[in-house]
């Protein structure tokens, strides 16, 4: 749910997710190393703070994109920080294409060597394979 670059969240939007996260905090700690406290009202354990800590494990962040009143209370709105803050994505895409090309070349050569090994050759006047 956090990877939509146009979506925004408030602490209210994440309450159900946060309650579920607190109930599964042992699993979260085991698999991510992120500690989620049992008290949902603790200052460093709110929905946005927990989301930010988990996203940080992926190198991502939620950033405040505005404040508005929700139910009469000033409420911050957050969205996913850009996935490409310094313009590196096109470079990584080119590298990935290059690496996939090299990988496919290695696979083709390996398959060719298995199907028709260079140490075996066919007799020129028959279908017999000579070692």
Image (cartoon, grey):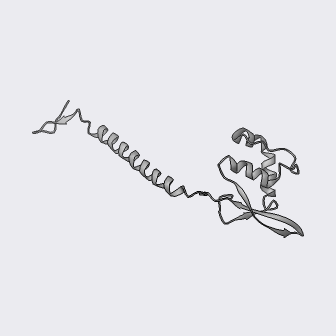
In the image: residue 79, left or right of residue 85: right
Is 19 above or below relative to 65? above
Name which residue lies at 36% across and 42% down: 106
Number of disc labels? 0
**Observer-nearest of 95 and 22:** 95
Q: Position of residue 108 (x, y in %)?
A: 34, 45
Residue visible at 69% across and 40% down in the picture: 31
Residue 60 on image: x %, y %? 66, 52
Give the quarter of the figure containing the N terminus: bottom right
Q: Give residue 103's position: percent from left, percent from top.
A: 40, 45
Task: Classify residue 115 by image quadrant.
Answer: top left
68 shown above or below 33:
below
Residue that protrudes farthest toward the front in the picture: 86
Q: Measuring 74% from the left and 52% from the top, which residue is drawn there?
A: 52
Q: Which residue is farthest top? A: 131
Quadrant position of residue 70: bottom right
Q: Which of the 4 quarters of the picture holds residue 30?
A: top right
Foreground: 10 or 30? 10
Q: Quadrant of the C terminus?
A: top left
Q: Is residue 44 above or below residue 120?
A: below
Residue 93 in percent (x, y) is at 49, 55
């Amino acid at each position: 749910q956090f990877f939509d670059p146009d979506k925004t969240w408030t602490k209210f939007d994440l309450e159900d997710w946060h309650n579920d996260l607190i109930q599964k905090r042992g699993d979260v700690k085991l698999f991510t190393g992120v500690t989620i406290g049992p008290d949902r009202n603790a200052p460093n354990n709110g929905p946005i703070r927990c989301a930010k800590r988990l996203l940080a494990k992926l190198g991502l962040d939620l950033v405040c994109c505005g404040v508005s009143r929700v139910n009469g209370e000033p409420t911050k709105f957050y969205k996913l920080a850009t996935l490409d803050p310094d313009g590196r994505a096109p470079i990584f895409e080119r590298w990935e294409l290059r690496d996939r090309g090299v990988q496919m070349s290695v696979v083709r050569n390996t398959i060719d060597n298995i199907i028709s090994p260079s140490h075996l050759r066919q007799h020129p006047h028959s279908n017999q394979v000579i070692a």
